[in-house]
Amino acid sequence: MSDGWTPYLRSDFPEAGDEDRARIEAETGHRLPEDYWRLARANQGRVPDPEYVRLEGGGRARIGVFLFLIERERVTRTGERSYGLLSAFRGAQEMYPAGIVPFSDDTGGNFMAFDYRGGGEPAIVFLDHETEGEAGITRVAPDFGTMMGRREAE
């Protein structure tokens, strides 16, 4: 198993700082997990290798590109998405219950997200972009560290 990171987008962003974290946490209303923050600061816009994770109920899903912590408008005439965490969060609010905060995009419209609805450390869930509400949410792991330990190659 490799533990590398592959660039997905051509843009390189500077490492996110405390002010970026404060802005994200203020808008989402939730504290980001420390283990996620450490990885995301250095790897925003990149895909972990391996990039698939086993789901708790069976099957697997692609983790995909870690969303940008430093928001920049990247929407073009062709409709390219921004891949920003806050952009994804705003979109998720329209489809899923409160307390869901996306952190990665599988580039097919689905997300991995933090689920803060249970209180405490957030669980990790997969969001199916074709299904709204609770039916579109599949539990992946009890926390971020467990999810990253369940990664497997394609």
Image (cartoon, grey):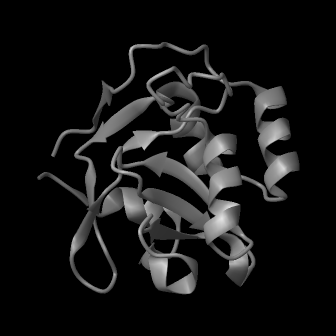
52 to the left or right of 68: left
Which quadrant of the structure image shows residue 151? Answer: bottom left
Residue at left 72%, top 70%? 99
Q: Where is 42 relative to 60, above or below?
A: above
29 to the left or right of 141: right
Residue at left 67%, top 26%? 70
Residue 128 visible in the displayed image = yes
Towards the viewer: 57 or 36: 57
Q: Where is 84 relative to 42, above or below?
A: below
Residue 33 visible in the displayed image = no
Q: Where is 19 relative to 88, above or below?
A: above
Towards the viewer: 126 or 94: 94
Tell me where residue 132 appears, x and y as whole percent: 53, 76
Tell me where residue 100 appears, x and y as whole percent: 65, 67
Tell me where residue 2 appears, x and y as whole percent: 19, 39
Residue at left 48%, top 70%? 125
Direction front: furthest residue: 77
Tell me where residue 112 appears, x and y as whole percent: 46, 59
Residue at left 45%, top 75%? 131
Direction left: furthest residue: 154
Which quadrant of the structure image shows residue 107? Answer: top left
Q: Where is 150 relative to 75, above or below?
A: below
Total numbered labels placed on residues in the image: 0
